[in-house]
Amino acid sequence: MSLQFVVTKPRGPLGWWILVPIVSLTIAVLWWSAAGTKLSIADFIAGLPWIADFVGRMLPPNFAFMEKLIRPAIETVQIALWGTLLGIVLALPICFFAARNLSPYAWVFHGLRQVLNVMRGINEIILALIFVAAVGLGPFAGVLAIALHGAGMLGKFFAEAIEEIDEGPLDALRAAGAGTLQRIVFGVLPQVLPTWIGVVLYRFETNIRVSTVLGMVGAGGIGFELISSMKLFAYEDTAACVIVILVLVLVADLLSSKLRAMIR
């Protein structure tokens, strides 16, 4: 069996006139971005010995230190869990009216979409710093930061899933005299729940990784131990923290994948 590759060529001279400017503009933008970010293969190669030196200082990992990381690791999972749950609670009332096909007025749709943009547009670390100042050091600040940012992300995905539903069941319910709540419960939720659950599981997996970083700004979790070990130049302890974080992420990814497969 032979494989044949078909290359689609621009039809006529007009196709080339469109393709050439697009390719040229793409190359120009990439070149401009490379200059702005100071991309340099030579600098990277020159820095490899420093990377090797840093990794060498982390070896061998201090496995005895892992006993101290049990509580922070559990705290990290708790932050991710409650941050995800509160994010869902915040996103649900917004997403129905942020969906174009359910929103009663255009200004409501556009207004709530901008609210979601603001919520997810502020980085979790910035939110954690704000909440640390508000409620003090500890995991509660991390929960609030993840919940607020996550609500913006989940609300957007929830609303977009609603916009992609089949309108047939809604029309049938509307013709039968069903109210708004009945149309949502019997016409919308059965169609979007599998997608929503998949998004929530992925968000929880992401929040596990995020919560490990928030500890660096005093929002609890294993990130506090990570940054403390680095400040004390105890790089063997840092390696132990990294291993525990990797285990948390891998376990969360495995469980999330299994649950998503069960949903399908």
Image (cartoon, rainbow, N blue to C red):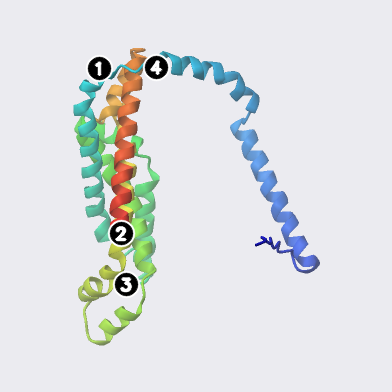
Which of the two labelled residues, at mark 3 and mark 2, occupies the earlier sequence position?
A: 3
Looking at the rendered structure, the kind of residue marked 2 is Trp
- Please, what is the three-letter code of the amino acid marked with disc 3? Pro
Tag nearer the camera, 2 or 4: 4
> Are discs 1 and 4 less than 8 Å apart at CB?
no
| Disc assigned to residue 104 | 3
Question: For the residue labelled by badge 3, is the local secondary structure a helix, a strand or a loop?
Answer: loop
Q: Is residue 178 left or right of residue 24?
A: left
Q: Is residue 184 visible?
A: yes
At which x and y percent is residue 180?
23, 75
Give the CA distance from mark 1 to mark 2.
41 Å
| Tag 1: amino acid | Ala
Disc number lying in front (3 or 2):
2
Residue 71: quarter of image = top left
Residue most toward the front? 1
> Is the residue marked by circle 2 packed among few (<14), some (14-19), or many (20+) residues within 10 Å?
some
Q: Is residue 206 above or below residue 71?
A: below
* Residue placed under numbered mark 4 in the picture: 58
- Determine the CA span between mark 3 and mark 2: 22 Å
Ranked by sequence position, the earlier of labels 3 and 4 is 4
| Residue 236 percent coordinates (x, y) | 35, 16
SS at mark 4?
Answer: loop
Q: Quadrant of residue 196?
A: bottom left
Query: Considering the image in quadrants, where does the C terminus appear?
Result: bottom left
Which of pointers 1 and 4 lies earlier in the amino acid sequence? 4
Which residue corresponds to mark 2? Answer: 196
* Residue for badge 1: 64
Residue drawn at (25%, 18%), measured in percent from left and top? Answer: 65
Q: CA distance from mark 3 to mark 4?
A: 58 Å
**Is disc 1 placed on a helix, strand or loop?**
helix
Q: Position of residue 144 (x, y in %)?
A: 24, 41
Q: Position of residue 62 (x, y in %)?
A: 30, 16
